[in-house]
């Protein structure tokens, strides 16, 4: 399916929810309603509808007008309740303040810091430095998922991550294991990981059952294709809606496997099977993902789209663009940011949050 334009309308073509309908809160600092019990606020919503021909239309409405116009007011009220309701703590962390997840790649070939932390002592020292800089979560990955990356064996992945988990087990940080593989999930949780962060959204062989048995919080990410193929020619009808639908289906699959919704968070997968336009749409439409009723993680740090928009900078020269994307996601109510540059991002978060408080 090729990307199709979304048609702006003065009013819904048909009553909201009479056809597939999605709501994007239009976040503004002085909004009337709090989004997901957090700091982002909104008054109006963009009402997106998909029609029988596969095309999309959009119009802007206030909450009361939406409820009045809705084909199914009970459904509309339930969707609004999900948008407004405070989120449960995730991995013991309150979602009423932004949380930083520090990226710790213990791989030789990750796109940004491959090889920098592939000795356990260096990785442990880097994790402690990120924790000191403000990271509440340390995300440890032993398999690169950069575009074009080839998979590694489970033994290779485990040999990379288990010593680091052991060294950080008593650090006080929440430890996350970044893996697609059931065996690694099980061994890592036994070794001290308190979160499973899966770029495959628990679609791998045995992954959803392993996560359910582990009983720890999970982050499920959208990716079109695989790391080997995802950037070949990514296409969507309208990326934000189709990514939301994918994530909703994965939440339902996880619930069916026995994972409570209170243990879930989602990641729309910035840079994973998306063009630059798709990526920017995701950031601009992050507020719509609150329809899913779970915390949102955004990981745009140092991604290649920054260089494509700018001047082709190397990965370690993309901090300004990373901060711009992170703050944009924060203003959309994203509760967690996955970042390489923890100290710099924390400073930006503190300034942004203080600006919101002093309006």
Image (cartoon, rainbow, N blue to C red):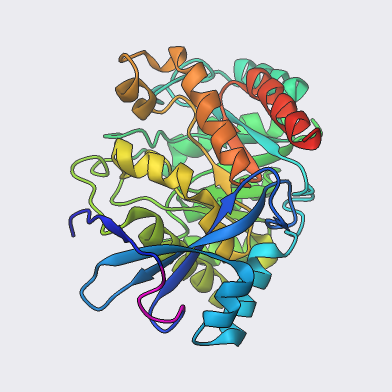
Q: Is residue 43 magenta?
A: no
Which quadrant of the figure has residue 144?
A: top left
- Residue at figure coordinates x 39%, y 65% from the top left: 10
Whether residue 219 is visible:
yes
Position of 322 relative to 207 (above/below): above
- Residue at figure coordinates x 74%, y 49% from the top left: 95
- Residue at figure coordinates x 53%, y 87% from the top left: 72
Q: Nearer the viewer, residue 146 or 9?
A: 9
What is the magenta segment's predominant secondary structure? loop
Whether residue 260 is visible:
no
- Residue at figure coordinates x 55%, y 36% from the top left: 328
Rendered location of residue 285, percent (x, y): 47, 50
Rendered location of residue 17, percent (x, y): 46, 80
Q: Is residue 12 magenta?
A: yes
Q: Which residues are magenta?
A: 11-16
Q: Nearer the viewer, residue 5 or 335?
A: 5
Rendered location of residue 190, percent (x, y): 68, 49
Q: How many marks?
A: 0
Q: Nearer the viewer, residue 96 or 46?
A: 46
Position of 291 relative to 198 (above/below): below
263 horizontally vs 76: left or right: right
262 horizontally vs 73: left or right: right
Position of 256 relative to 84 (above/below): below
Q: Nearer the viewer, residue 182 or 348?
A: 348
Rendered location of residue 7, percent (x, y): 29, 60
């Amino acid at each position: 399916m090729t990307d199709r334009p979304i048609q702006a309308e003065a009013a819904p073509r048909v009553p909201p929810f009479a056809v597939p309908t999605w709501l994007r809160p239009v976040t503004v600092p002085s909004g009337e309603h709090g989004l997901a019990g957090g700091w982002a606020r909104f008054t109006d919503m963009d009402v997106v509808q998909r029609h029988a021909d596969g095309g999309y239309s959009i119009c802007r409405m206030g909450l009361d007008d939406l409820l009045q116009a809705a084909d199914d007011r009970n459904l509309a009220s339930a969707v609004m309740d999900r948008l407004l309701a405070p989120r449960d703590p995730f991995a013991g962390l309150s979602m009423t303040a932004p949380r930083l997840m520090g990226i710790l790649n213990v791989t030789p070939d990750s796109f940004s810091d491959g090889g920098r932390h592939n000795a356990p002592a260096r990785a442990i020292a880097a994790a402690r430095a990120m924790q000191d800089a403000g990271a509440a979560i340390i995300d440890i990955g032993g398999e690169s998922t950069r575009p074009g990356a080839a998979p590694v064996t489970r033994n290779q992945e485990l040999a990379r991550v288990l010593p680091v988990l052991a060294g950080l087990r008593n650090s006080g940080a929440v430890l996350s294991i970044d893996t697609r593989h059931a065996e690694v999930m099980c061994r890592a949780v036994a070794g001290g990981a308190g979160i499973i962060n899966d770029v495959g959204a628990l679609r791998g062989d045995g992954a959803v059952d392993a996560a359910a048995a582990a009983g720890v919080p999970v982050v499920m990410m959208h990716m079109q294709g695989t790391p080997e193929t995802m950037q070949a020619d990514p296409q969507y009808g309208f990326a934000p809606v189709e990514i939301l639908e994918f994530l909703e289906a994965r939440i339902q699959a996880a619930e069916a496997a026995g994972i409570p919704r209170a243990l879930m968070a989602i990641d729309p997968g910035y840079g994973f099977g998306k063009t630059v336009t798709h990526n920017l749409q995701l950031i601009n439409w992050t507020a719509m993902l609150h329809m899913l009723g779970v915390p949102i993680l955004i990981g745009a740090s140092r991604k290649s789209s920054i260089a494509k928009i700018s001047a082709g900078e190397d990965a370690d020269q993309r901090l300004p663009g990373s901060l711009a994307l992170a703050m944009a996601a924060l203003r959309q109510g994203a509760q967690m940011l996955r970042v390489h540059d923890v100290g710099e991002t924390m400073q930006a978060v503190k300034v942004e949050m203080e600006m919101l408080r002093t309006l």
